[in-house]
Amino acid sequence: MAKTHMQLQEILFSQGFGTRRVCAGLVQQGLVTVAGEPCDEPSMDFEPKGLQFTAQGVAWEYHEKAYLMLHKPAGYECSQKPSTYPSIYTLLPAPIRQRGGGAAAGVQAVGRLDQDTTGLLLLSDDGKFIHRMSSPKHHVPKVYEVTAKHPVDDKQVQKLLAGVVLDDDPKPVRAAACVQTGENRLSLTLTEGKYHQVKRMIAAVGNRVEDVAGLHRSCIGSLALPDDLKPGQWRWLTAQDLLSIAAAPAAKA
Ligand code: URA
């Protein structure tokens, strides 16, 4: 349950500004302001909900749990320990990566996108939310904009809707929706998240996802990637965004 009041040092710690000792030190050194006023007493109590503070000049708002969206750029891996490309976590400010402290500190991506895939990625430190969003049982629809190497035709669209068999499972996987949006372009809605699912489904109908800028996730539920969130940028999800995630995406014309 959300605490009604917390000590300032605890608030800073919960938001990822360092260990408890570091957070107490920041307050004692006069490096913290709360609602515009300096505060140098680490054990001073505040109502955390919606609290605006600064720590070492960084403006922050208290969030009991973190729910974020990131516009994932190409050339980043969705792993904490990337093998070849930089990690998407390097695109987030340090407090977001450190919140909560301990071994499970920070936010985690809800599912993964390939290094060359761009678009909407959710991150959170709420384990239940991550589980609900990634569980195939919940069938959260995700919309992918695909640019294919070869022209798309109606036969391919119909096969994707009817279901194709991938190499790791005899049970066919089908697109919940599939609309041709250009000569080489498709908008594909999936409710599962198997490994390389879009690329493998497109290959299964005799086409191929273009190597560069071929795959972009535009929506999760009815939450669309905002036009003003540029590649590499992130923002907190609003209460409305969280409701939109659970709602079905609008059908494409
Ligand atoms: N399907 C893929 O093939 N790659 C992604 O990154 C996401 C879905």
Image (cartoon, rainbow, N blue to C red):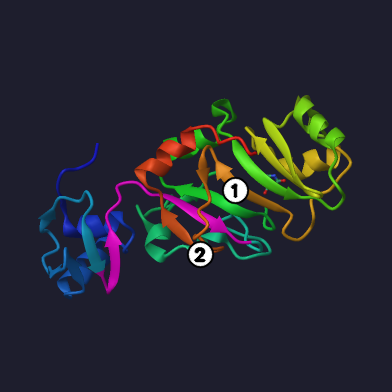
- Residue behind label 1 places its C-beta within 8 angstroms of ligand 1: no
Query: Is residue 131 something one can see in this rendering?
Result: no
Residue under the point 77% across and 45% down: 199
**Along the line of sight, which residue is nearer the eye, 12 or 24?**
12
Give the number of the mark in front: 2 or 1.
1
**Along the line of sight, which residue is nearer the eye, 230 or 127?**
230
Residue under the point 23% across and 52% down: 50
Q: Position of residue 2 (x, y in %)?
A: 23, 40
Q: Earlier in the sequence, mark 2 or mark 1?
A: 2
**Along the line of sight, which residue is nearer the eye, 156 or 125?**
156
Dot 2: element = helix
Residues at marks 2 and 1, CA–CA distance in whole angstroms:
19 Å
Q: Position of residue 197 (x, y in %)?
A: 72, 40
Q: Position of residue 216 (x, y in %)?
A: 66, 52
Q: Which mark is residue 78?
A: none
> Could you tell me which quadrant the C terminus lies in?
top right
> Could you tell me which quadrant the N terminus lies in?
top left
**Along the line of sight, which residue is nearer the eye, 140 or 133?**
140
User: What's under tag 1, amino acid-wise?
Assistant: Ser
Query: Which residue matches tag 2?
Result: 91
User: What's under tag 2, amino acid-wise?
Assistant: Leu
Query: Which residue matches tag 1?
Result: 218
Q: Which residues are magenta?
A: 55-73
Label 1 Cα neighbours within 10 Å, binned few <14 / some 14-19 / many ≥20: many
- Using residue 16 as the reference point, say whether residue 149 is left or right of it: right
Q: Residue 70 magenta-drawn? A: yes
Give the vertical position of 206 relative to 233 (above or below). Answer: above
Label 2 Cα neighbours within 10 Å, binned few <14 / some 14-19 / many ≥20: some
Dot 1: element = strand
Residue under the point 65% across and 61% down: 74
